[in-house]
Image (cartoon, rainbow, N blue to C red):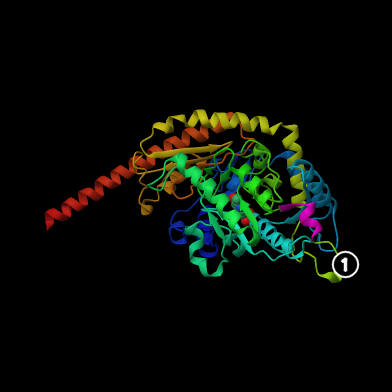
Amino acid sequence: MNTESLHRWDHEFVWHPFAPMQAFREENAPIIESAEGFHLYDTDGNRYLDGISSLWCNVHGHRVPEIDEAICKQLDRVSHSTLLGLSHPPSIELARELVARVPKGLTKVFYSDSGATAVEVALKMAFQYHCQKKKNAAKRDLFVRLADAYHGDTIGAMSLGGIDLFHKVYGQLLFPTLTLPAPVTYRLPDSHTAESYLQFCDDELERVLRAEHQRIAAFIIEPLVQGAAGILVHPPGYLKRVRELTKELDIPLIADEVAVGFGRTGTLFACEQEHVVPDIMCLAKGLTGGYLPLAATLATDEIYDAFLGEPHEGRTFYHGHTFTGNPLGCAAALASLKLFDEHKLLETIAANGQRLRRNLAPLDEHPHVGEVRRKGIMVGIELVANRETKEPFAPPLRMGHQVTLAARKRGVIIRPLGDVVVLMPAPAMDGDAIDELCAVAIEAIDEAVSHLSQRERSTAKQAGEGRERR
Ligand SMILES: *Cc1c(COP(=O)(O)O)cnc(C)c1O
């Protein structure tokens, strides 16, 4: 199969996720055939640096011998057997290893297969917990979330999300939630300074939780960084404040660590940085080192115990997917965790974070960069038409996408969130590759901007010519 026919069949048969298909079909995006380390190779033999960790999940690189071997060994035993009514060694071992590493108090592991399902599991667990817990067992059906939250694309997870571009069209299908302002200060309501706005967020948090706590089933949060919203970094102390209040008011806290988990923010889990132990924690993306679809929802004994009882009492958690806790995925995850320790990956992450900061410092002066946001090795570079007024580019310009195309020509794969250029290097990426990623990102931004001014010039000229003709 040559590249040309693959492109033809891709356009004919494949509907890509999150893709405006009409424009996408005209682009002939690279068809990735193989990978090695931090590079991807397409069917024409072009080599690309994987600047987004294959959408935020790859950890140690591609074709890592230890992970490949662990999967092959498991393949020799069994590639899938169910956790419904049976068990298998990799799921047991992995649960034990996870409990040893997550914040102390999370003791039970419920598997599924993606971030969205990990969140669905969490919200059903929290809801049913209140129906069945012993003390003051009142039904609670309200979930609290932050503005612009993202927790996945299934109906329940979307209900907890708040990104209009993705979710608005489904509004009627989603259940209502309580939305709190997110503590981010790049664009402020007129009446506020950064300081007064953060105070307002804290006050709202406290006001809403105190007023509504008896109806609140759980508070869900992306700890430290709201990823899909554009790598929005919360100020230190916010997560801790959320935990203090939810603890005081007896509201379960769900930490969605799907994006931030496995080292991305500098610690193995983001919650650690504020010494927070959530009641429920969702893991996915990096869990298997980014190899296979596997997710986990962890819970405390307090939550778990509410589901105990005689089978006929009906306290069972009736949830499970066919491929829940797939043994190949668990084997990959076990190998990945081992590499975290053996390669002292948190040290590499710390060094990579500093390297990203140094390399991207020149963008702090760039006329079309509004803000460079970074936590650990998660980076969001917000492009704007005007740095001073923070005026965004017109959406049809697709500036973030133009940067992606310019980077691709230079052999680097990145993918934006609107006009936020996201750099999401694998935690284990080597320093030279980090340098290349940053250099290309800066060049690509410059190229996209220079094309823009040409376009603007030509539109202005056309407008002028139009006037002359009239
Ligand atoms: C990606 C993501 C999800 C959804 O994970 P999928 O595996 O894509 O379903 C959920 N929550 C957060 C915070 C994410 O970044």
The quarter of the displayed image where residue 6 is located: bottom right
Q: x%, y% of residue 199? A: 50, 43
Residue beneath disc 1: 310
Q: Which residues are magenta?
A: 296-306
The quarter of the displayed image where residue 276 is located: top right
Question: In the rendered view, does 447 fall on the left or right side of 30?
Answer: left
Q: Amino acid at mark 1?
A: Glu
Q: x%, y% of residue 360? A: 48, 32
Residue at (50%, 59%) from the top-left corner?
166
Whether residue 169 is situated above or below residue 37 in the rendered picture: below
Return the residue nearer the eye: 399 or 104: 104
Residue at (61%, 59%) from the top-left corner?
143
> Crowdedness of circle 1 by 10 Å Cα count: few (<14), some, many (20+)?
few
Q: x%, y% of residue 30? A: 52, 49
The residue most toward the right is 310
Question: In the rendered view, does 403 fall on the left or right side of 113?
Answer: left
Question: In the rendered view, does 278 fall on the left or right side of 82?
Answer: left
Question: In the rendered view, does 117 fall on the left or right side of 81?
Answer: left
Whether residue 320 is situated above or below residue 408 in the rendered picture: below
Return the residue nearer the eye: 131 or 339: 131
State the quadrant of the C terminus: bottom left
Residue at (51%, 66%) from the top-left corner?
171
Asked if residue 150 can be seen in this view, the reply is no
Residue at (60%, 64%) from the top-left corner?
155
The residue most toward the bottom is 312
